[in-house]
Image: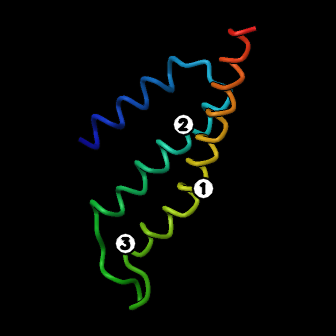
Amino acid sequence: MGIAQFLLWVVWAGVTRHPSKWKLWAVVLATSLAMLLEIYDFPPYKGYVDAHALWHATTIPITYLWWSFIKDDAKFRTRDSVKKVK
């Protein structure tokens, strides 16, 4: 399911003319790289940080970037809809 979702976002990001599609590309790429921390788990480094902890840390900026894209998308879609009505 994760691969299917990844492919759907990649295809949509590739064909859209959305002004903030760079954010979507960044989220897709960062999420894919972060998932490697879940897949290739490693024990705690010097007893402090393991792969799962790093995965949780990477989700903070990814989430911020994702919601930034969602906000930009809402503005873009609303502006596009208003133009069609006028």
Quadrant showing the C terminus: top right
Q: Nearer the viewer, mark 1 or mark 3?
A: 1
Is 69 placed above or below 59 here? above
Q: Secondary structure at mark 2?
A: helix
Q: Secondary structure at mark 1?
A: helix
Residue at the image point whose x is 70% and y is 10% from the top: 85
**Alpha-carbon span between mark 2 and mark 1:** 14 Å
Residue where numbered disc 1 is placed? 64
Residue where numbered disc 3 is placed? 51
Q: Nearer the viewer, mark 2 or mark 3?
A: 2
**Alpha-carbon span between mark 1 and mark 3:** 21 Å
Is 22 placed above or below 77 here? below
Give the mark nearer the N terminus: 2 vs 3.
Answer: 2
Left or right relative to 83: residue 29: left
| The label number, if any, that marks residue 82 in the structure image | none
| The label number, if any, that marks residue 25 in the structure image | 2
How many other residues sit within 10 Å of disc 2, few (<14), some (14-19) or many (≥20)? some
Return the x and y of residue 53 as percentages of the image width and height: 41, 75
Q: In this figure, what is the number of numbered marks?
A: 3
Q: Secondary structure at mark 3?
A: helix
Give the mark nearer the N terminus: 1 vs 3.
Answer: 3
The amino acid pointed to by label 2 is Trp
How many other residues sit within 10 Å of disc 1, few (<14), some (14-19) or many (≥20)? few
Between 78 and 56, the one lying in front of the other is: 78
Residue 40 sits in quarter? bottom left
Between 70 and 18, the one lying in front of the other is: 70
Residue at the image point whose x is 30% and y is 80% from the top: 43
Residue at the image point whose x is 63% and y is 34% from the top: 74
The amino acid pointed to by label 3 is Ala
How many other residues sit within 10 Å of disc 3, few (<14), some (14-19) or many (≥20)? many
Return the x and y of residue 45 as percentages of the image width and height: 40, 83
The amino acid pointed to by label 1 is Tyr
